[in-house]
Image (cartoon, rainbow, N blue to C red):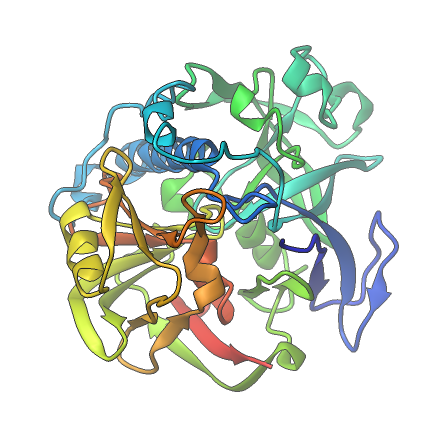
Amino acid sequence: MFPKATLTITVALAVLSSATPVVLDSGVRVPYQKREFLTNDDGTFNHEEAIRQTARTHNKHRQNMINLKNNMGYEAFPEKGAEIKPVMSYNTTSWRHYEKRQKEPTIDESNDLEWAGTISIGTPAQSFLIDFDTGSSDLWVPNIACTSSTCKSKHRYNPASSSTKANQTGTFSIQYGDGSTVSGPVYTDKVTVAGITAANQYFSPVTTVSTFFAGEPADGILGMAYPGISNLGKSPYFNTAFTQKTAAANVFAMKLAKSGSELYLGGTDTALYKGTIEYQPLSTSNRFWQLGNAKALVGTNVTNSGFQTIIDSGTTIMYGPPAAVQALYAAIPGSKLYDSTNGYYTFPCATPPTVSFNWGGKNWVVSTANFNLGTTARGAKTCIGALAGKDLGLGSGVWLLGDSFMKNQYNVFSFAQNAVGFATLA
């Protein structure tokens, strides 16, 4: 139903890459790969994968809150209700009672995109396929010392093969809901994304990799948020690159789409958007790409206002506090709660809602295609919405806007202005 596609990286310097680049006016493109999505090829909702992704998102941000406490103290939790939640367990049978009322079983297949591209680490360069994540701040890849079946399916970093590596003190660890972890030692080495190099970059070549990553194409994750949520407590890759003057500007941008997708490092690609960029200042310091004073609308009806939003490319859908999300769906005729545990709702497929977000400027609309995760069963007339009600521990007034939101406009992340910008796609 949904076509497979590629994503590209464009950097604001004419540089070399481990892949064959296409040189633009001031940059270079590198092919990206696809991702698993939450809609099956037959148009039905992949409920099991959705719950797995929810557990992964929950536990990623649980770790972010732990990192924030360790780096900045509890005073860095200004939002009411912000807390370090318990690990969310993912039980592969816990979802099945929801499927019993459906006419057809769902098919677990891959669709849509992963915002991932090739990077290199070390001297000589070792290549990895990496998921670029604006909702975290650390880089990790599998270590050659990891011999699990999950690791063996990935590219693995060999410290002994790099002349620029250095073993550092400390360890890196994130726990996932299946009881497994991503963990390992801490190293520094040369990290390059399409020619933009960060020398002596802190990262972890992990010796254990959660089975959560077994079926995903990416080898690891490169976080692009602020140092305040770093598990390593060090400068993230892009911050290091800018400090070392290998990135032209302290800005990066993303277009996420089924085709023509792009990560642009060191500026914005003016060919991909029209009009001006609407910048909104961050409501927090040295943490997330977080914007305050948000409004949510269904059509022209403002259903929620005055809340916080985190823009997170490493999260597939959108999440909000359960009561707030319930209020939004109450404005959608015919909507119903579908999964009370994980906060998914249905709406009539024939009358999809127009959902948008506003931070004091334009209403940024989530398209019908991006709001619809698929039908509840083959041939069904009810569809699953891409906004779920879930308490992730980020605060009672904090929403998380992932790919389902970001795919609708050009997204700009400015360390220079401490702001996120949005622009209309060309």
Q: Where 258 sits versus 26, above or below?
A: above
Residue 365 in which image quadrant: bottom left
Q: Nearer the viewer, residue 30 or 368?
A: 368
Q: Residue at x 42, y 49 (%)?
A: 380
Q: Where 425 sits versus 218, above or below?
A: below
Q: Residue at x 62, y 28 (%)?
A: 215
Would you say residue 401 is visible in this rendering? Answer: yes
- Counting from the top left corner in percent of width and height, residue 232 is at 46, 32
- Counting from the top left corner in percent of width and height, residue 92 is at 43, 19
In the displayed structure, does residue 234 sit left or right of residue 15?
Answer: left
Q: Nearer the viewer, residue 290 or 260?
A: 260
In the displayed structure, does residue 240 sit left or right of residue 176?
Answer: right
Would you say residue 231 is visible in this rendering? Answer: no
Q: Residue at x 15, y 58 (%)?
A: 327
Check the image and name the residue furthest to the right: 20
Residue 258 in which image quadrant: bottom right
Check the image and name the residue furthest to the bottom: 275
